[in-house]
Image (cartoon, rainbow, N blue to C red):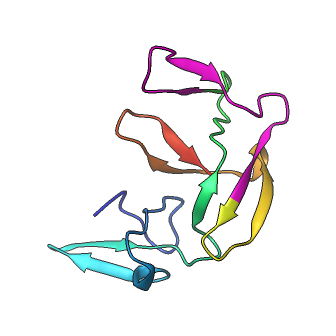
Amino acid sequence: MYADSTPNSIYGAPCPNSRFLGRTITQNNRSEYILPAHELPAVMDNCNPLPDRTWYTNSTYGYIPNNHYDQNGQNIVFIDGHAEWRKIAQMNRRMQFFYGGYAWW
């Protein structure tokens, strides 16, 4: 289970199975809500809206500017196939990565 997500929280959990989309899954006394297909990203740019606007790579490069540094947003393609450009003001912190960074959408 991941991120303590609920239908009303800003946090989302990754979806390992398309049958889970839009449902609450309970396992070992923990429940997680999986966003529906029109809200769950399949592919997105890596945009960090925090003041430094960098992201961390697991390589010798470390922190580097995101690819839309001057554009203040990111492209997102959702599981249902629709795509949109989302400005930083429209994004929320959704999911924490193992190294401490966050996915925003």
**In this picture, is 59 found above or below 89?**
above
Start and end of the magenta stretch?
55-76
Q: Residue at x 38, y 69 (%)?
A: 16
Residue 23 percent location from the top left of the image: 43, 83
Quarter-of-image position of residue 78 = bottom right
Q: Give the camera-side residue of 20 and 7.
A: 20
**In this picture, is 12 found above or below 25?**
above
Q: Is residue 63 magenta?
A: yes
Q: Is 78 displayed left or right of 63 in the figure? A: right
Q: Is 32 displayed left or right of 80 in the figure? A: left
Q: Seen from this angle, which residue lies furthest front?
A: 59
**In this picture, is 87 found above or below 72?**
below
Q: Residue at x 52, y 71 (%)?
A: 8
Q: Seen from this angle, which residue lies furthest right?
A: 71
Q: Is 61 displayed left or right of 4 in the figure? A: right
Q: Is residue 17 magenta?
A: no
